[in-house]
């Protein structure tokens, strides 16, 4: 696998991880005990910290990319393992 492919997979995992870890630790103005300003949504975060989200996403995406690459090298899970609807005939013959 080329390093550019690994980088592209890492970036895809990073974006997915950023959206996954973003809600953790966020508190609304009501939860913090502050007054909501006129024109703001009640669900708007009062303590959003983008650096913390970026750090968490970086760590999680590094772990996921490492697992993806290890699976690529060691062939733990293959495409044929994910085909539950109609498995290939060779797999059915091996089970008999």
Image (cartoon, rainbow, N blue to C red):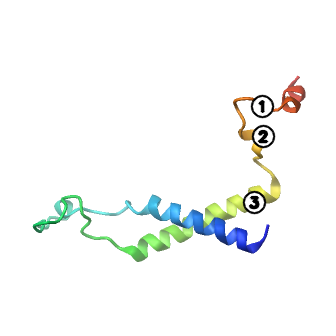
Q: At x 82% / y 32%, what residue is drawn?
A: 88
Q: At x 81% / y 52%, what residue is drawn?
A: 75
Q: How crowded is mark 3: few (under 14 residues within 10 Å), some or many (20 or more)?
A: few
Residue 70 bears which disc, if any?
A: 3
Residue 45 bears which disc, if any?
A: none
Alpha carbon distance from label 3 to label 2: 18 Å
Viewport quadrant of the C terminus? top right
Residue designated by label 2: 80
Determine which quarter of the picture holds residue 22.
Answer: bottom left
- Circles 1 and 2, Cβ within 8 Å, touching? The answer is yes
Q: Which of marks 3 and 1 is nearer the N terminus?
A: 3
Alpha carbon distance from label 1 to label 2: 7 Å
Alpha carbon distance from label 3 to label 1: 24 Å
Determine which quarter of the picture holds residue 34.
Answer: bottom left
Residue designated by label 1: 87
Q: At x 28% / y 70%, what residue is drawn?
A: 47
């Amino acid at each position: 696998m080329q390093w550019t492919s690994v980088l592209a997979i890492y970036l895809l995992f990073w974006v997915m991880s950023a959206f996954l870890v973003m809600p953790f630790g966020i508190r609304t103005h009501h939860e913090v005990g502050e007054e909501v300003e006129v024109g703001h949504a009640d669900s708007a975060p009062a303590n959003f910290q983008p650096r913390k989200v970026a750090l968490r996403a970086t760590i999680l995406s590094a772990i996921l990319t490492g697992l993806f690459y290890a699976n690529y090298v060691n062939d733990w899970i293959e495409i044929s393992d994910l085909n539950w609807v109609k498995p290939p005939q060779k797999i059915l013959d091996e089970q008999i």
